[in-house]
Amino acid sequence: MKDWGPLRYFPLVWAALRRKPVRSVLTFLSVTVAFALFGLMIGLNATINLLAQQARADRVWTFLRYDNTGLPIAVAKRVATLPGVKTITVMSYLNGYVGDPKNRTFITMGDGDYGRVYPDQGVTPEQWDAVHKQRNAIVMSRKQAALWHRKTGDMFTVIAPEITRADGGKNWVFKVVGISEDISYAPAGMIFGNYDYYDKSRPLADQGKINEVDFLVKDAGQAAAIGQRIDRLFANSASPTFSDTETSAFSPSNFGGMDVQTVTREVAAAGLLMMLFLTATVITQSVRERRAEFATLKTIGFSDAAMIALVMVEAALPCLSGAVCGVAAAAWLAQHMQALMPPDFGIPAPTMAASVFAWALASACGVALAGAALPVLRLRRMDIASALSGRA
Amino acid sequence: MSMLRQIAIVSLLNFRNLRQRRWQSLVVVAGMACVIGVLLSMLSMAEGVHQANLNNGDPRNAIVVSRGTVFEGNSSIPRDKAHIVMAAPGIAKAADGSPIADPILSVGVPARLQKNGGRTWIALRSFGKNGALLHPTFHMVAGRMFRPGARELIVGDLARFQVAEMRVGDKVSMPDGEWPIVGAFATGDMMDGRLVGDTETLMASLRRKAYTTIQARMASPAVFVIFRGALTSNPALAVDVMRLPEWNAKSSADFIKFMHVIIYGVGVILAIGALFACFNTMYAAVESRGREIATLRALGYGGFAVAASVVLEAAALSVAGALIGASAAWSLYDGVLSGLGSEVFTLTVSPPMIGTALLWAVAVALLGGILPSIQAARWTVSDALRAR
């Protein structure tokens, strides 16, 4: 006979699980649900850490210090002359809505160098060329294109109640010239347009005003110092500035003013706790109901260790399979979360990194071990005679 | 024997032997405690922000913003237009006959978070000569009021919990130098997490030509319509006029929805987990009581009474768990000061929220108890007696 090693005992575990199929299925389902939540939470943490890692230390953002309305473009010209500044871009935001004030969106209007300062925002150099060749051209990321049902060649009208055109109108009509890939820190998607067109379309008094000057520095180590230098330079001007490196802006401990990491860990822990209780009671009950069976196994020569292993595996199977299915469900949910959010808000999609799977599997093993501990102790102390007679 | 009496007797019997099934039953209790504890803890934040936003400022006030404004910071009302607004009909008059209305400048000032030094912006609101009149709850708690014309600020009494260097005596970096904080005030609303300075001095320092918004006290609730009509029909103005509570609700609605989507999403997922656990426990409970149920049926108790008792037991366990979770959330978080960025608010676990939580618990119990109860009711006497 072929030797299957310890695997030959697997039918025993399988039989135990099939003894009460409803119970096993329900246990599996609740573990799956708990791990779906666990996956989302730990995945969100992974995303925040990933954003912090991806944030470029050599990219600096400069905007107005006390609000965000109209930084003179002259600031950008001055910043460009500073030593250590490599590539510089200016941008304005066109905030508005599509059709109904509820359907808000915004377009990032970048100048010719935007794509060089932000090569990592999903827009290809060819797409930027297209945007700057045709004045009212825009590139939409996939999510925005899906949201507004637009494809390349379509027109797209944004009504911007706060941003008037030179002709007095508030309707901004654009032509979609390309669809770009989404990026993780813009969960609602992005739209990119031509700053020059935007600027020239505004009333004379409003021209030359931007929202942000962003630039790359030659030496990342100097980024913070250059930012501070800019802020000192404009401290006493009509437009005091505030500069920040991208690394500092994406600090994981201060994500949008919230300590997301602590909250997510606590929620994940609550899910695990629930599961621990469930697994522990289910396995305890299952072992208690089968004392005679375990006594028989002991009688025919099964060691304590073998029986403990059997119980552990019986506890671990629903936990581990639930963990795998739960994290898979989380991965699916992560893709569809944004659809439920109000248009201006979003949390970055949780990343289903290998570390999330690893954490889930480790936690599942932990829960199974902890849950099986008590019944295992009882089994070791079990008196075979009384167990077989059903008196225990 | 009446149906109700039957249900009562069978349920009593169930509760008496709960002790034999205590670990099993604890699954439902602990599960529900986790669900409701987590749900209410997270909701306490959303509710705190919501209440703080709704109760921000005097409800008798009206607010004027530039037309189409979505975010307060984008509103802009030039000086000359502000004069027209201040002269509109319907504004309550102060003792000296001047209108109780003030143009307000609001900006954000870069600051550091108290807990980790992270970046944030603290809101700076300006007060004109009617500032205190427009905020009847405003009073100084330390130091003194700023002097009009002087480059001084006062700070809300709660700002220091969230933002570093926000005590009386600290200095705030402004475009024309460091402004000292000369006093601390309290209003009991979101102003308590903000800085306040003199409107015209701030306008000069920040080189502004336009205010952000205008607030005006209405002479009576009824005149609001006249006030709004006068402003919105004036072709020289392009403004929106709202009652302050209306504006507060509108401007915070999306953020509240955003938080609710996340919180209820997490809550629903946890509750589904608890639902399966409840299913499991109630099935096990029914199985372990097979003989008892059969005996009852043999004695003439109806299937419905047996089924109802199962659901009742599930509901009792689930509500008990929910109460544990709710009291944990309430004792840990209700009334606790918290912050989001630089905004300060009080976490709230209100009775209606606890009521909703109990409804969740009952719903989970009903869903989780109904299938096992049907099984219990459908068992024939002979089947059940054979069950181990």
Image (tube, coloured by chain):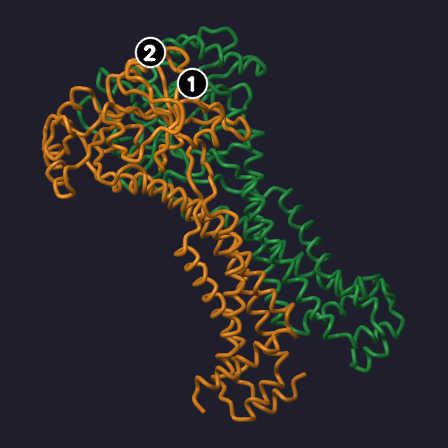
With respect to residue B215, does A294 lie above or below?
below
Q: Which residue is mark 2?
A: A238
The secondary element bearing badge 1 is classed as strand
The secondary element bearing badge 2 is classed as loop
With respect to residue B215, does B4 lie above or below?
below
Q: Is residue B214 visible?
A: yes
Q: Residues within 10 Å of mark 1 (few under 14, many from 20)?
A: some
Q: Residue at x 43, y 42 (%)?
A: B346
Please name whichever residue, B309 or A315, is drawn nearer the observer in this view of the structure.
B309
Location of the C terminus of chain B by quadrant is bottom right
Q: Which residue is mark 1?
A: B172
- Residue type, mark 2 in image: Ala
Q: Could you tell me which chain the residue with mark 1 belongs to?
A: B
Chain the render paints orange:
B
Please name whichever residue, B271 or A161, is drawn nearer the observer in this view of the structure.
B271
Location of the N terminus of chain B by quadrant is bottom left
Instruction: State the image coordinates of residue A95 (x, y, percent, origin top left).
Output: 31, 31
Please name whichever residue, B154 or A133, is drawn nearer the observer in this view of the structure.
B154
| Chain A: drawing colour | green
